[in-house]
Structures are given as C-alpha cells and as structure tokens.
Image (cartoon, grey):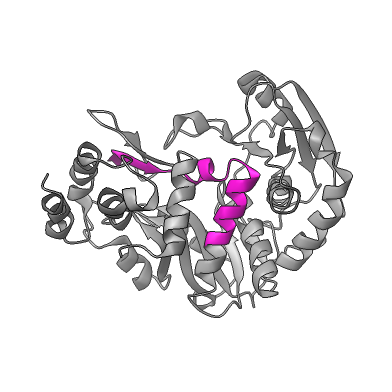
C-alpha cells in the first residue's frame, strides 16, 4: 500500500474540494517560486468551508502528534496559515487535551481589508453583517480558542448565514475556528473566505479573495480588534520554541522567510522544524539541485509532511479506483505530471515511470 488510511482520507478531502489540479496541453500554473507547473495543490480550496477546515486541521493534528512531542508554538505564514494555525491548535486540544500556542505573520493591506466592499464587488453577496468579538480571545492557544468559539457560536444564528469572513486579520483566525465548530458540532457547513492583498501567483481566482464565498451569500464577518506584536499575531518571546507549519512548499521560500522573521525574536535553535500538508519534493532551483527537504534540514528546519506530490500522483494512478477515485489520474494526467515533475525531480523517475508499465500503458 502506497498511502496510509489517513493519507488517503486527506487525498479524498483534496479531491472533493478540487484542491489538487493538473493541466493538460500547454497550460501551466505560475507558482510563488516563479516556477511553471502542470500541477497545483491549493489548500485555500480545501479550507473553503467548515468541513474542509475541520478535515484539514484533523489531518495536520494527526500528523503532528506522530512526529514528536507537542511542546512548541505553531507558527504559520500568511495568508493560508492564518486559518490553519488556530484550527490545528483547536483540533490538537480536542484530540489530546494538549494546548499549543499558535502565531502567524501577516501581509499589510495598503488600503485596509475593505472586506465588505471587496465581497460585494467580487462575489455579489446578498448581505454583510459584522460581529465584534473583542475581548473574547485573550491568548492564542488551542484551549483558549476552543473555549472562545464554544461561547461565541451559540450567539450566532447559523440558519441566517451562508458564509463567515473577517474584518481584521485576527478575525480570520476566529472565523475559521467558528466554521470548524459549526461543522463538527452543529453539522452546519458554513462557507469560509477572506480578502487578501493582491497576488499574482498560484490560483488566479485568489487574487483578492481566498476561500469559498459565493454569489448571493449572506456573510457574517468577525472582528476582534486584536493587533499584531511586531511581525506576528500571537505571543512570540525569546523563550518560544517554534515549529513552522505551512500549507504547500515548492522551494521552501515561505518557510525560510518565516524563519527569518522568527529569529528576530528567538534563537535559531528554538525553531525546531517545519511541516507542510503537501510537499512537491522538488529541487530548490536550477542553480541549486538539492532537494528542498535537504535545504531546510541544513538550515535547521527539518521538514515533515502529510503527502508528497510523486507519491500522491502515483498512488492515484495505480490505486485510485480502489479508494473511490477512479479516473481522477489516468494515463494522460499521469504523463502530464511526469513531464512537469521530471526537471525538478528528487526521487527516482524510473520508479515513477514504471507505474505506466504496471498497467500496460
């Protein structure tokens, strides 16, 4: 068996949410690393509603609980890391009763978040209401966030809204935790989304908005009034032990950028490692043929991951049908992946290509 049961569950989540994409022909995705690729993993699509948030947080929590002691602060890069860090911490608290602190950095909005303006213009939402939860979250830990949303959710008429968003950066974290609980406890799958400063890489539909908010949605936006301390939201002190938790890594750039910010507050040896959901398992760059995992290891940021690109595509090609994913990755899609992956491969291409022979392609 190529993937474990928990890995297959997470693959199923990615496929259900159209978060794992592959293009044919000459079409490509432009990645943050400036690399062009036929395939793309987008955790923003996975975490576009309460169910996806809960399943993603669960996958991370299960993985993190298996790779060492839970005795650190989860630190995640913006923007995808803002909903990830709190919901992973909440799930770990529910699963283990261990309450990890969490923190995240942020991107500056030159014109402010303007959530209502952007959602009305870009999504044509039907209504927009704000909920001020100032003072509800006193500290950024799994236990505190869990307790806060337990108190906040009963004050929300879940039947009167379709989606949840935020009016400030910390509100994104609280809104995600609310969506997580609404799904897990109340079986209400709220769509989740937030505005972001414009970007030019990855999935172009996320240029201004990340998540699943749709036309006509009735949106509740959470505001916290919480301000960052320096470059982070959350408590980073000189004694903090940190693990950087990101969504996807191609070149390791976002992890290294976050590390640079962290070592402005804590010693490098206090950053004990890094974790992603989806590791593309590629070389650092054309000039640096080392695997990204090796680069991070040598920088003192050993990488752990839930899935890699080559194992995921190979497993879907050979075993997808047996796990309910027939036809997702056929011969055409698998060859497209191989062609895109080959120039940056860090694994044995002969082994990957042998999968074609296994099915007589």
Span colored in magenta: 35-59
Magenta region includes residue 242: no
Left or right relative to 209: residue 221: right
Residue 307 percent across, percent down from the top left: 39, 59
Measured along the vertical axis of the image, is residue 108 above or below residue 352?
above
Q: In the image, what residue occupies the spot 13% across and 55% down?
A: 354
Quadrant location of residue 35?
Answer: top left
Q: In the image, what residue occupies the spot 78% across and 41% down?
A: 222
Whether residue 141 is visible = no
Magenta region includes residue 46: yes
Closer to us: 284 or 133: 133
Q: In the image, what residue occupies the spot 82% across and 31% down?
A: 129
Left or right relative to 234: residue 258: left
Residue 308 percent across, percent down from the top left: 35, 58
Measured along the vertical axis of the image, is residue 169 above or below residue 58?
above
Closer to us: 256 or 59: 59
């Amino acid at each position: 068996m190529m993937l474990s049961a928990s890995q297959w569950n997470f693959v199923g989540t990615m496929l259900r949410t159209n978060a794992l994409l592959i293009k044919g022909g000459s079409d490509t995705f432009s990645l943050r690393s400036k690399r062009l690729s036929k395939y793309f993993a987008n955790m923003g699509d996975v975490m576009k509603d309460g169910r996806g948030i809960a399943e993603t947080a669960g996958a991370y929590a299960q993985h993190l609980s298996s790779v060492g002691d839970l005795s650190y602060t989860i630190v995640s890069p913006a923007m995808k890391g803002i909903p990830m860090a709190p919901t992973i911490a909440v799930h770990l608290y529910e699963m283990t009763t261990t309450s990890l602190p969490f923190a995240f950095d942020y991107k500056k909005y030159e014109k402010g978040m303007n959530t209502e303006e952007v959602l009305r213009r870009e999504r044509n939402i039907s209504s927009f209401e704000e909920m001020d939860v100032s003072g509800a979250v006193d500290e950024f830990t799994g236990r505190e966030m869990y307790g806060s949303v337990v108190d906040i959710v009963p004050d929300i008429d879940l039947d009167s809204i379709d989606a949840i968003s935020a009016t400030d950066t910390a509100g994104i974290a609280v809104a995600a935790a609310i969506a997580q609980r609404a799904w897990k406890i109340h079986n209400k799958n709220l769509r989740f989304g937030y505005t972001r400063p414009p970007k030019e890489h990855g999935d172009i539909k996320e240029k201004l908005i990340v998540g699943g908010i749709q036309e006509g949605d009735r949106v509740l936006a959470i505001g916290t009034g919480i301000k960052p301390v320096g470059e982070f939201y959350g408590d980073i002190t000189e004694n903090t032990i940190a693990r950087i938790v990101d969504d996807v890594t191609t070149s390791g750039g976002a992890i290294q950028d976050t590390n640079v910010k962290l070592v402005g507050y804590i010693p490098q040896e206090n950053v004990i490692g890094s974790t992603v959901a989806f590791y593309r398992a590629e070389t650092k760059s054309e000039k640096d043929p080392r695997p990204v995992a090796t680069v991070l290891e040598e920088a003192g940021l050993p990488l752990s991951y839930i899935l890699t690109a080559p194992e995921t595509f190979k497993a879907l090609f050979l075993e997808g049908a047996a796990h309910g994913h027939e036809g997702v990755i056929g011969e055409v899609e698998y060859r497209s992946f191989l062609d895109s992956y080959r120039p940056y491969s860090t694994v044995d291409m002969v082994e990957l290509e042998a999968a074609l022979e296994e099915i007589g392609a």
